[in-house]
Amino acid sequence: MSEKVLMKGNEAIAEAAIRSGCKLFFGYPITPQTEVSAYMSKRMPQVDGLYLQAESEVAAINMVYGAAATGARAMTSSSSPGISLKQEGLSYIAGADLPCVIINIVRGGPGLGGIQPAQSDYFQATKGGGHGDYNLVVLAPSTIQECVDLTYKAFDIADQYRVPVMIMGDGMLGQMMEPVSFPAHDDSVTFDKSWACNTTGMKRKKNIVNSLYINPDELENLVWERQKRYDLITEKETRAESFFCEDADIVLVAYGTIARVAMNAVKKARAMGIKAGLIRPITLWPFPEQEIANVAKTAKSFLSVEMSTGQMVYDVKLAVNGKCPVEFYGRTGGVVPVPQEILDKIVEMSKKL
Amino acid sequence: MQKEFIISGFGGQGILFIGKLLAYTGMKNNYEVSWLPSYGPEMRGGTASCNVIISDDAIGSPLVTEATEVIAMNGPSFVKFEKSVAPGGTMYYDSSLVTPNPTRDDIKYIGVEATKLATEMGMGKLANMFLIGKVLKESGVFELDVVFEALKGLVPAKKPELYDLNKKAIEAGANL
């Protein structure tokens, strides 16, 4: 472990990407993630990497598409409206089976929305914001240290399964500072890049990166083959953390920074004698269905807490599968809930038990 | 220890910096810390504020809603954050810029003529340090020596003279 430093989430993600071997970054400024770009513009030249400010978000994601096709580790970052612009590129990257990492530091929407923290891009991130049968792996850190750890993980997952991986934070996580350390990156793990378009050296058949397949049978086979990889990711990479769930009557489900606010509320509820617990999904796709299903065997009700009008709550309902009621509490538009309002909701639910 | 600060004033008064000094000092002394700024267009010449938490335990919500200490360096901040002081907490303010109109009897108010005194000593830009000196002394969150040690890590290497200036301002504030 290296010495602890005080860093903003945006900067910590950028530094972790560089330590993961990301040498190609294509950015475009937008609040509240601009520090990712700013940090990259300073650091990339120091590590013989490339920082390029594209002419638009659309250009940036297509530059990632091209860079990823060479087998190099490539990344872009943006915030909600910018991520909407990148959706076509993401669908192509998924269709071409290319690994890359995309950062979304979510702000309030829809439209230009606002610049304060939100989680209202959950559907877009986890249900395929672009067209076609594809998924992004979506990682949701809740501390600055986890921003670092999951950025390391994101590049490895991307390379291992040849899929785009999104790290989804929110404005609060991007802007706040906490102590972080950068564990030594394990560079010994290598990934198969025999598919990369990085010159044949006149020694092998050329590789082609493409997402156009006119023959339906051929396309169907490819899509099902990819689906098998998604199944493998679901089996191997699903992550969640749970607290006080063993005897919990009311189980909160929350991710990212809101999981921390929810944790405060859970502890206060416990102090009042209400048996509350918390499940924090770390991967939003694949969603930790099994963890939730297991707790649903003993819990009496669930509460999905989000900075949206209610998006993840549908996945919670699917996972709970009718075993007990699932309720929702949310704030949106850039409003961050405080522990007391979540606690009020828990108390209200406890009266119905 | 669990100390929760709201620090607020005009952009340019060094509001975010004194928050960073507290968080950094906490980190260097093995506390859990978080530093959360307000961000957005309001920072351009308008108000700036940050939330700092220093704790023995892992920090949940980084948003401070019940501050043990509020530091207000302008009038609007005093009005806005007076209600955010936890009962028994303290409202510190720069009395050369804030005309206080206290409305609570369950919190302490401590005014320091930070900007006036700092200007008289030829350190007008370090009013924030005067005020934080007083806060450190009254709240007992850190010993001054511990803060000075941390300050070394925050002063730009190219401007070492800033260390002595900031130290002097903090000491002057603490001795008021």
Image (cartoon, grey):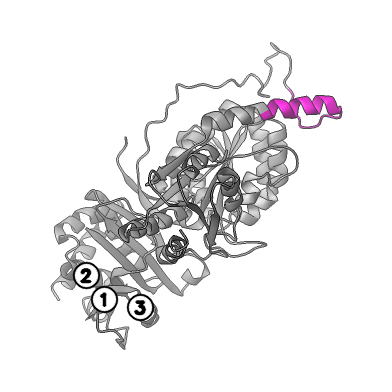
Tag 1 subunit: B
**Left or right placement of residue A88 versus residue B136 in this view:** right
Identified at 68% across, 44% down, the residue is A128
Q: Give the extent of the magenta segment.
A: A208-227
Where does residue A297 sit, x and y in percent of width and height? Answer: 49, 42
Residue B83 numbered tag? 3
Can the viewer see residue A3 in this picture?
Answer: yes
Q: Name the element at disc 3.
A: helix
Query: Mark 2 — residue?
Result: B135
Residue B92 is labelled as 1
Q: Residue furthest front?
A: A353
- Cα distance in 3D space between marks 3 and 1: 13 Å
Is there one chain holding both mark 2 and mark 3? yes
The three-letter code of the residue at mark 3 reads: Lys
Circle 1: element type = strand
In the current view of this chain or complex, which residue is farthest to the left?
B175
Q: Are marks 2 and 1 on the same chain?
A: yes
**The residue tagged with tag 2: helix, strand or loop?**
helix
Q: Position of residue A342 (x, y in %)?
A: 45, 62
Q: Circles 2 and 1: CB distance less than 8 Å? A: yes
Q: Amino acid at mark 1?
A: Tyr
**Residue A312 screen position, x and y as percent:** 58, 51
Mark 3 Cα-neighbour bin, 10 Å: few <14, some 14–19, many ≥20: some
* Residue A217 within the magenta-colored segment of the rendering: yes
- Along the polypeptide, which appears first: circle 2 or circle 1? 1
Q: Is residue B99 magenta?
A: no
For residue B106, which quarter of the picture?
bottom left
